Amino acid sequence: MSFLFRFLSLWPLWLLHGLGAALGWVAFCASPTYRRRFLANAQLAGYRFAQVRAAVGHAGRMAAELPRLWLGALPACRFENAECVERAWAAGKGIVFLTPHLGCFELSVQAAAQRWSAAHGPITILYRPARQRWLAEVMRTARNRPGVQAVPTELMGVRQMIKALRRGEAVGLLPDQVPPDGQGLWVPFFGRAAYTMTLAARLAQQTGAAVVLARCEREPWGRGYHLYLEELATPLSDVLELAVQQINQAMEQTIRQCPQQYLWGYARYKQPRPLLRTGGEA
């Protein structure tokens, strides 16, 4: 499998995306559970299947492009509104980059690191090793690409993120990811209670870091990507629950800007898994 992964990393992006789109539809047709969850989540957000059917293929593209993103040369990526990042650093602030499971969220961090890490230090992300040995080895190499520092999903890793922000560096998170039990709050997401991480809000509150929303859209026919960046519409509340709600609302708005590339099949409303007592949030 490791050899296959490395072989696929040499393929052109258009071919990987073509293969991925086909696999996405195979998964959608073959799994009734996945299909029901996809349709239910999209309907909850107010979308008919016809409006988001492209997301079926994009889910497959997300998987197929990983070998290239982790082991190959970075594809072309255009930036939109990079000035909001420059303003945050000019003000002497660290940055909390937030992106939902939309488009190529893997490239969001890598492209930002390629552009800014030389001047402002690495972007720190949380990392959970894969269970398969071959994949864990690949991910260990991939997650620590130039300008990206991966830290463990435990208390030590959270502390490293706080230190990075206080040094004026950046961190990256997917705040629509379901955290372990005890590390989140039940707040609305598209009108339904979803267990939502508090880490993103706490990092910004404790360090005074700027919050920047990111979405990295795939361009047609494997022509590359377009990374959109924007500041949070209003300052983050000092009240934790309100801040978490603000972030969920920001994620909803980001998703609505490109619902055709969101992972509607993600189990966003599942019960949190038990927390392994090897660490936790700060």
Image (spheres, helix red, strand yellow):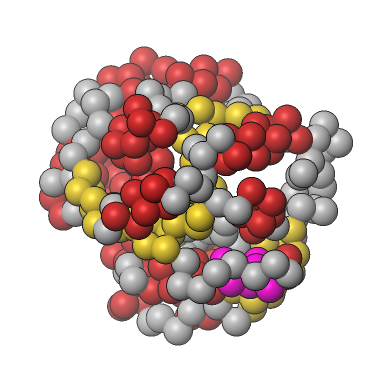
Q: Residue at the spot x=35%, y=41% of the render?
A: 112
Q: Quadrant of residue 133?
A: top right
Compared with 115, 100 (above or below) is below
Q: Where is residue 171 in the image (x, y as percent from the top left)?
A: 52, 42
Q: Where is residue 71 in the image (x, y as percent from the top left)?
A: 34, 23
Q: Residue at the spot x=42%, y=18% of the render?
A: 2
Q: Residue at the spot x=41%, y=34% of the render?
A: 120
Q: In which quarter of the image is the C terminus?
A: top right
Q: In which quarter of the image is residue 195?
A: bottom right
Please give left or right for residue 178 compared with residue 255 in the image. Answer: right
Q: Magenta stretch: dominant SS?
A: helix
Judging depth in this view, the residue of 161 and 125 nearest the camera is 161
Judging depth in this view, the residue of 62 and 238 nearest the camera is 238
Please state the total of marks drawn on the protein image.
0
Note whether residue 125 is visible. no
Toward the right, the furthest residue is 277
Residue 126, magenta (yes or no): no
Q: Residue at the spot x=75%, y=49% of the render?
A: 180
Compared with 44, 186 (above or below) is above
Judging depth in this view, the residue of 9 and 27 nearest the camera is 9
Q: Position of residue 178 (x, y in %)?
A: 65, 55
Please give left or right for residue 74 compared with residue 220 in the image. Answer: right
Q: Position of residue 64 (x, y in %)?
A: 33, 39
Note whether residue 275 is visible. yes
Q: In which quarter of the image is the N terminus?
A: top left
Compared with 17, 138 (above or below) is above
Q: What is the magenta range?
A: 242-247
Judging depth in this view, the residue of 27 and 225 nearest the camera is 225
